[in-house]
Amino acid sequence: MERQTFYITTPIYYPNNKLHVGHTYTTVAADALARYHRLRGHDTWFLTGTDEHGLNVERAARQAGKEPLEYVDPIVQWIKELWATLEIQYDDFIRTTEERHKRTVQAIFQRLYDQGDIYKGVYRGLYCTNCEAYYTESELKEGRICPVHDRPVEWVEEESYFFRLSKYGPAILEHIRRNPEFVRPESRRNEVVRFIERGLEDLSVSRTSFRWGIPVPFDPDHVIYVWVDALSNYITALGYPDGELYRRFWPASVHLIGKDILRFHAIIWPALLLALGIPLPRSVYGHGWLLIGGGKMSKSRAGSQVIDPLTLVRKYGVDPVRYFLLREVPFGADGAYSEEALVRRINADLANDLGNLVWRTASMIERFAGGEIPAPVPGEDDGILKEKAAEVFDEVERALERLEIDQALQAAWELPRRVNKYIDEQAPWELRRQGREEKLRTVLYNAAEAIRLCGVLLSPFLVHTPGRIWDQLGFNPPEEQLWDDARRWGLLPPGLRVRKGEPLFPRLDLDEVLNGEAAKTPAQTGTPDSKPGAAPVEPAARGSATLPSAEIDLETFQRVDLRVARVTAAAALPGARRLLKLQLDVGGEERQVVAGIAEHYRPEDLVGRNVILVANLKPVKLRGEISQGMILAAAGPDGSLALLTTDSAAVPGSKVR
Ligand code: ME8
C-alpha cells in the first residue's frame, strides 16, 4: 500500500518586527494539522521560516544603524523562541538568507529567463512597501491608500524584468475548475477565479531601487522580487530539483496562509510552478484574520492593537492560548480577538467541561472504588460512552480532513459533555446507595476510559493537557501511540491507581484577570465560633408558609452571591449529630461548608450532586471546622428536608439568578 504523505507549510514571516497573535494563528493551526497527521502515521513534513529580504527590512536595518542580516538575526531568533514556547513542532525552518535557498532561487530565475518566461521591460506603478506589491488604482482605497495597511502607496518607475504571468491565467483557471479543493475555502476560490477572469498582466519580478535581495544571476544591478524569492521557499527547503525530501513530499498537501496573501499563492505561485513544469500543490487554504478593534491585527498598527503572544502564554499557559486560537474563530472566517473571549473559553470549556469532569471522576473513583480504576462488568455495560466516543472520533477526523479545525474541536467537546451527562444520569452515588456495586464499577470504568479518550482527541491540538489527563488516571500511554490504536475502546487497564492532582484548569475571575483586581474570594482564615446551633441550613427554612416576608429591593437581593456548587466529598462531623462536612467545587474553587443536614442525607449520597451555595456569607467556625458559606434547602413532607439542587446542565461556579 502506498504510504500517505502530508506536507504542510505556513507562510514564511517577515522579520522586520516581532510577530503578534495573528501570526501565531496560522502556525498553531498548521502545527495541529501536522500533529494529527503524524498521529495517523502519515509521513509528515511541516515547514515554516522567515522571509528576510525586501525594502522594508533594508529600511528598518538602516534606521537601526545595522546591516540587514545583523538586524534580522536576533528577530529570527526571537521567532524561533516563540515557536518553541508555543510547542510548534516544525520539521524545518528555512531562512531566505540561507545559501541553500538563494542558490536555488537564482537557478529558477535563470531557467525562466532562458526559456523566455522572463523578459526585460520598464515598470511604472503604485507600490505598497509593506505588501511589497504593486497595486492598480481600482484596488486602492480613496487617496491611494493601501487596502491592507491603510497607508499611502508610492509611485515607482524602474527598469524591471517581467514574468509572463498573463500566459498562465487560462491554465490556472482550468486547474481550479478541475480541482475544486485547490483553493479553499470556497468563498475565496470564487474571488481568485473572478480575479483571473478579469485578465492577468505580466508581473514585475526584479527591483533596482534597493539592494537587500537575491541578485538576478545574469544582471546583478537587479534583485529578485521578494515574492518570487519567498514563494520558492516551499521547494528550496525540500532540496528542489533533486533532493530526497523533494521527491518524498512534493507536491505539498496544503499551504496554510492568511487571506491577504492568497493571490500570491493561488495565482503567482502556480504560474511559476507551471512554467517550471512542477506539479501544483494539492491545496492552498486562505484563513481569515484575527481582528482587533474592528481592524486586522497587524504590525504596522499601533501598540495596543497588537497582542504579544508571549505575554498571553505567560499569563494563561500554552494550552489555553492554543485552544482559544483554534476553537474561537471558524477557520476560514475573520474573527474578533479579545482577552475576555479567551477567559470565557478557558472557564466554560477547559475548566468546566473538561477539568471538572476529570476531577469529579477521579474523586468518585477515590470514594467509591478505593482510588483504583475498577474493572467493568460486561453484563452491566450500556455501551453508551463507547458508541459516543466512536462517533466523536469519526466526526473529528472528517472535520480535520476538511481543515475545519474549530469544528473538529467542537466535535471533540461532545465527548466530555456526554460523559458529564452520563455521570449525572447514572448517578454513581445512587448506585452505591442501592448496593448496585457491579453497575457502579462499570459506570466508573466507562467514565475513566472515556476521559482517556478525551486525552487522545485533544492530542493534535493541546500539548500538555492529554498527558496531565492520563496522569490523573494513573495511565502511562505507550511511547509511540498512533491515533487508530489509541482510539480503540477499552485500553485503560483496570487496577490503575488514580492520582487526583490540581484541577486541570483553574477557573479564572474575569474582573481579576482583566483588571488585575485582588481576588474576591472570602477570607480563608477562621472566624470566631458562631452561636451554637446556627447551622448553615437554617431550621427556619422548614415549613414556614407565610408569604411574603418583608420586601427587599433588587439591589439588596443581588448582593447575595448564589452559586451552583458540586459536592466532591462529604463526611460526618464526629460528635455533631446534625452536621455534615462538605467539600464543594465552585467552578474550580474549592470550599468547605458545614451543613445541618446529617439527619436527612447520608454523606455518600451527596457526592457528585449539585447544590446551591450562598457564596458570600461570612465564614464561620462550627465545631472547630471552617464553614465558607451555606447551602440551601427547603422543608419536605413529615419533617424531612429537601436540598436545593439544579438541572443537570448547570455548571459549577455559575451564578444563580
Ligand atoms: O505575508 N490574523 O509575512 P507576514 C490572521 N512574508 N493572520 C494574520 C494576521 C491576523 N491579524 N496578521 C498576519 C508575509 N497574519 C510574507 C509571506 S509566504 C511565501 C510569504 C498572517 O509576516 C498573514 O495573513 O506579513 C500571513 O499569512 C502571515 O501572517 C505572515 O504575514
Image: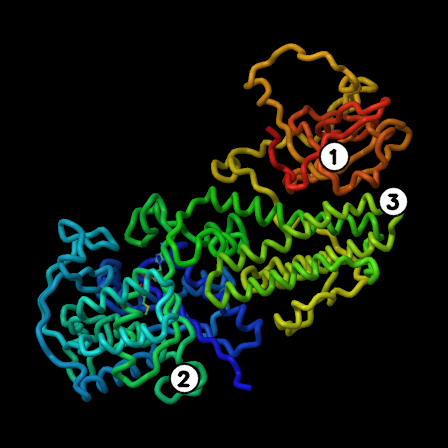
Q: Secondary structure at mark 3?
A: loop
Mark 1 or 3, nearer chain start: 3
Image location (x, y in percent) of residue 633: 75, 26
Closer to the observer: label 3 or label 2?
A: 3
100 or 371, nearer to the observer: 371
Q: Secondary structure at mark 1?
A: strand
Q: Please state the quadrant of the image where ligand 1 appears.
A: bottom left
- The disc placed on residue 246 is 2
Image-based side of 426 in relation to 91, left or right: right
Q: Amino acid at mark 1?
A: Gln
Q: Which residue is mark 1?
A: 592
Q: CA distance from mark 1 to mark 2?
A: 62 Å
Q: Amino acid at mark 2?
A: Tyr
Closer to the observer: label 1 or label 2?
A: 2
Q: Amino acid at mark 3?
A: Gln
Identify the residue shown where x is 79% and y is 52%: 365
- The disc placed on residue 434 is 3
364 or 109, nearer to the observer: 364
The residue at the far top in this view is 550
